[in-house]
Image: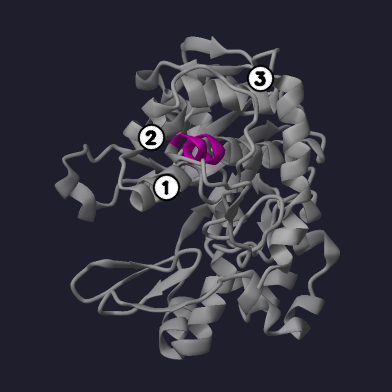
Amino acid sequence: MTRVNIHMKPILLSDSHLLAEHREIIRLFKLGKDYWARDPKKRSVIPNDFKLGKGHVNFFYDKLDWVADRYLALYAECTERGFNVTDMSDAAGTAWLDVKDRKWSDTLLANGGMRVDQMPELLEGTAVVGPLQAARADLGLPKTALVVAGGADNAVSACGVGALGEGDGFVSLGTSGVVLAGRDRYAPRAESAVHTFCHAVPDRWYQMGVVLAATDSLNWLSRVTGQSPSVLSDAVGNSLMPPGAVRFYPYLSGERTPYNDAQIRGGFTGLEVATGPEDLTRAVMVGVSFALRDSLEALRSTGTQLDSALAIGGGCRSDHWTTLLATILNIPLERPDESAFGAAIGAARIAICGVTGAAPENVMIKPPIKDIIAPDPDHVAAYDDAYRGFAAAYPSLKAMP
């Protein structure tokens, strides 16, 4: 959710931080789960079928509820003015959409003090909204240009790599981490903290697990040690080693999947006098990869089957980290040619389908593959054992003050 101040500078209400008009952090505030828990009466009226969309930090519903609680005039302006259209994939992130039937939910809207007539019209991502407005002539586009509904960031990225249906997916090792899989059917499992959203193409859905601090964990270690991420990464070399004694739990900003816990915090275990920067770097890479394994297992619990996946994001430029990740996930990872995919390409493909009527499966194809990184068979079993220990540690971390 973005507010724009009088100087046209966006003020973002992100997962954990709210920014004041003067761009000062006014307080840490756990949007979503913690705020929602303040009013259990509201939550109790939500049918179980819809709870998959509640309690995730970063959902629009909880942010608007926060604004209504503190800036009533702004909230009233927002609810009265309304908007024209939105696409299914973005609407799914509001927690007001009946994701299965792809329509606004009267129940969820009423719970937030909203009505269907206040909501934008819902369009599939490939639907044509209409001609370009005259006011946008300054963009240099022809008057005959058409506007297509488009989609949310991850949905559009999935279109860019051809992840549309069953068996298609990608692992993104970026600032945050994502494991995403296309689905031909709606198969939520709320307790796994897996997002189940409408895709940017008709009659498709996608599911994803999210790790809030992926390469950002390495960035954090870089700040602590005073060594750049590239120096830290280069120091571990390319040879995959068995799991070490040091463990890292990458919950620097809470965790999304599979815990949906904004308060959990990370840490190291197994430190000793001899522990050095290389040990910490390896532990961070392993811990982030284990967290992505958590997301993959959560997706599998819904019936998702990924026998291989595309590997994207800055972290996957590292041969070592990609091999480590493939070994921990125990699936081959395909690294595409970086010039042949991306959210911008996905958006262009959606526009092509909207304007020409072409079938998405014929347009949204997979990119050329640069190389395939296979799991290291000599280390799969050892990392499986270590992963089980990693997953079992959450209750102990949660119990710490």
Q: Spatial distance from mark 3 to mark 1, Cα to Cα? A: 30 Å
**Mark 2 in CB contact with mark 3 (< 8 angstroms):** no
On the image, the x and y values in percent for residue 268 come to 58, 51
- Assign a secondary structure to mark 2: helix
- Assign a secondary structure to mark 1: helix
Residue pointed to by mark 3: 308
Question: What label sits on residue 232 in the rendered view?
Answer: 2
The residue under the point 46% across, 42% down is 150
Q: Amino acid at mark 1?
A: Leu
Membership of 174 in magenta stretch: no
On the image, the x and y values in percent for residue 393 come to 74, 52
Q: Is residue 219 visible?
A: yes
Q: Amino acid at mark 2?
A: Leu
Q: Which residues are magenta?
A: 278-284
**Mark 1 in CB contact with mark 2 (< 8 angstroms):** yes
The residue under the point 34% across, 20% down is 339
On the image, the x and y values in percent for residue 347 come to 42, 35
The first of marks 1 and 2 along the sequence is: 1
Q: Outermost residue toward the front?
A: 273
Residue pointed to by mark 1: 221
Label 2 Cα crowd, 10 Å radius (few <14 / some 14-19 / many 20+): many
